[in-house]
Every structure is written in C-alpha cells, then in structure tokens.
Image: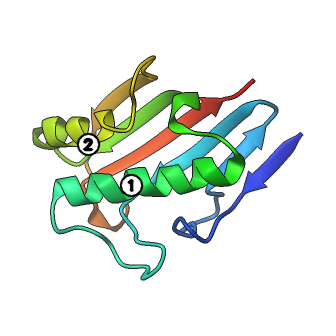
C-alpha cells in the first residue's frame, strides 16, 4: 500500500510530486531545498543556513511519517558546486549519530530555484 506523506511544517511541493511516499516499511522523501515553509522564502544567506533548513525540512517529513534520522538508510546530496562539500557534510553529519546511511554526493549543473544544495532520503522502519 502506498501512502502520501504531507505536512505544512515542510515546504509544499513546487511540482507534480509528493513530499514523501510511504510504501510498506519504506519512506521515500523527495529532494528538499532550503524553503522555509512558514514564509515560503529561500533560506539562502549561506551554504550552512541552506543545509540546516534542508535538514529541518527532512526532519519534519520524517516526524509526520513516524520516522527519525536513525531510520534513514540512503541519501543523495546534490550540490551546485563541490566547493560546498565540507560545509554541507559538517551540517549533514550533525544529524546522524551512528550507523550512518549510505550516500552519494554529486555536483550538478543547476538546482531548483538556483539553490546550492538539495537532499533526498530513503528510510526504513521495522
């Protein structure tokens, strides 16, 4: 069974997709960018601020679905420039304590709304 996950505490989708989809014990979180769901504005004063906002958005979606960061098994980080890697990695890493998820980080030519970072995640819960 497929369940659409939606929360007003994370940004509304800017296209034809869901914030997340739960299928069985799996949760698939769409790529999140640094949109503040309260103001609908980008949090883009710096790469650290962007990454914190992205991780907060992911946290809200996880909570809505009854998951937490320790349930994440896979992430993908998209960067506008690999020069941002160490700062993004430092913020990202602060959300995980042990048993880190699998991950890839890729530089891309462009991201929605010209942000510098987008992160998607897959979680699993028994």
Horizontally, residue 24 falls left or right of residue 116, namely right
Of badges 1 and 2, the one in the foreground is 2
Task: Identify the residue at the far top of this view.
Answer: 99
Q: Residue furthest front?
A: 97
- Label 1 secondary element: helix
Residue at horizontal 42%, vertical 21%?
Answer: 100
At label 2, counting other C-alpha atoms closer than 10 Å, the crowd grade (few under 14, some 14-19, many 20 or more) is: some
The residue at the far bottom in this view is: 39
CA gap between label 1 and label 2 equals 10 Å
65 up-or-down from 53: above or below: above
Q: Nearer the viewer, residue 90 or 76?
A: 90
Image spot of residue 108 (x, y percent):
28, 43
| Residue 1 percent across, percent down from the top left | 89, 39
- Split into 4 quadrants, where in the image is the C terminus? top right
124 left or right, relative to 92: right
Across and down, in percent, residue 54 comes to 38, 54
Q: Does residue 15 appear left or right of residue 42 in this picture?
A: right
Of residues 56 and 82, the one nearer the viewer is 56
Identify the residue position indicated by label 2 in the image. 91
Tell me what residue is drawn at x 59 percent, y 53 percent: 61
Q: Residues within 10 Å of mark 1 (few under 14, many from 20)?
A: many
Identify the residue position indicated by label 1 in the image.
54
């Amino acid at each position: 069974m497929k369940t659409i996950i939606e929360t007003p505490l994370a940004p509304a989708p800017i296209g034809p997709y869901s914030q997340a989809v739960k299928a069985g014990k799996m949760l698939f979180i769409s790529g999140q960018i640094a949109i503040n769901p309260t103001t609908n504005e980008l949090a883009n004063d710096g790469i650290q601020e962007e990454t914190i906002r992205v991780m907060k958005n992911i946290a809200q979606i996880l909570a809505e679905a009854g998951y937490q960061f320790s349930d994440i098994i896979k992430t993908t980080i998209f960067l506008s420039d690999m020069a941002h890697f160490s700062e993004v990695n430092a913020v990202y890493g602060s959300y995980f304590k042990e048993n880190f998820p699998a991950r890839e980080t890729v530089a891309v030519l462009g991201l929605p709304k010209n942000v510098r970072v987008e992160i998607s995640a897959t979680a699993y819960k028994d």
